[in-house]
Image (cartoon, rainbow, N blue to C red):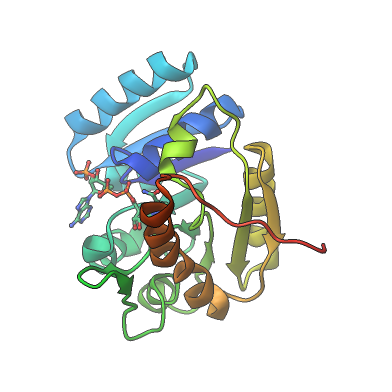
Amino acid sequence: MKIAIIGATGDMGYGLALRLAIAGHDIIIGSRQLEKAENAAVKAREESGKTNIIGMANPDAARAAELVVISVPSAGHRATVEGLKDIIAEKPVLDITIPMAFKPLRYAPPAEGSNALETQAVLGEGSRVAAGFHTISATLLSDLSHPVTGDALIVGDDAELKEQVIGLAKELGLNAYNAGALRFSSTVESLTPMLIGMNKRYGSNHMGIIITGA
Ligand SMILES: NC(=O)c1ccc[n+]([C@@H]2O[C@H](COP(=O)([O-])OP(=O)(O)OC[C@H]3O[C@@H](n4cnc5c(N)ncnc54)[C@H](OP(=O)(O)O)[C@@H]3O)[C@@H](O)[C@H]2O)c1
């Protein structure tokens, strides 16, 4: 699948780009600056040993993709989705962003209830939005000397898209679960600030979650 990752010059999107490229997908690293995207793609091709990674400016990346992943900091989330709306309103979108605030560290969702619900609201009726990968650490994804482990909770209202994203997570080596409708995105997004706090307390940088009893 041709997958654009908006913001894949950053840790999380970059790690996902590496792993998805290794799984055989054609990856487009998106950036607000073309040169930054191209440089990240060169580095990703070197690190992964794969040639199926290119860099483009965000709008071109989104236009070229079959699936668009939003991987920007929450502060730029709404503006990013609004800026790409004309291109992605009818495309499958995977939102992996988390609205967080600091001091104290906490979940800080927008008025819609979660970042994924904000994406759906901005893109409007007929949009197809899934959310997931919130509890998978960028450090884990980027460290190609280790397999990716842990469980991914995937939410969304479009059954076909959700199954596609679950399939992608499984290709990376994760256990992946259908965690329900997009309204549950607030629940899954809100796990990450808690995990960041736990990482600090336990001296880790990649704590995740595991579902039992399935
Ligand atoms: N880090 C993790 O372990 C982790 C795990 C799960 C989910 N997440 C979520 O994934 C998202 C990305 O995380 P990250 O750590 O990769 O973030 P990041 O490094 O801070 O940012 C990712 C990229 O977003 C672009 N960006 C920065 N500010 C922006 C703005 N105001 N508007 C639009 N684009 C902007 C930048 O790319 P350009 O300058 O190239 O455009 C940057 O390289 C976040 O929402 C985070 O909460 C992170």
Q: Residue at x 49, y 41 (%)?
A: 3
Question: Residue 185 at x, y = what percent?
Answer: 51, 73
Q: Is residue 180 left or right of residue 145?
A: right
Inspect this view and state whether residue 163 appears: no
Q: Who's the residue at 34% across and 25% down the image? A: 41
- Up/down of 8 relative to 195, above or below: above
Where's residue 42, x and y in %? Answer: 32, 19
**Residue 204 position by quadrant:** top left
Q: Where, quadrant-wise, is the N terminus in this rendering?
A: top right
In the displayed structure, would residue 49 be above or below residue 20? above
Image quadrant where residue 46 sits: top left
The reply to whether residue 41 is in sight is yes
Q: Residue furthest front?
A: 202
Which residue reaches farthest right?
214
Which residue is at 28% across, 45% downward?
A: 58
| Horizontal arrangement in the rendering, residue 176 relative to residue 189 (left or right) | right
Depicted 76 relative to depicted 180: above or below: above
The foreground one among 114 and 35 is 114
Residue 108 coordinates in the image, percent (x, y): 31, 76
Q: Nearer the viewer, residue 210 or 111?
A: 210
Quadrant, the C terminus: bottom right
- What residue do we see at 43% from left, 25% from top? 53
Q: Nearer the viewer, residue 24 or 58?
A: 24
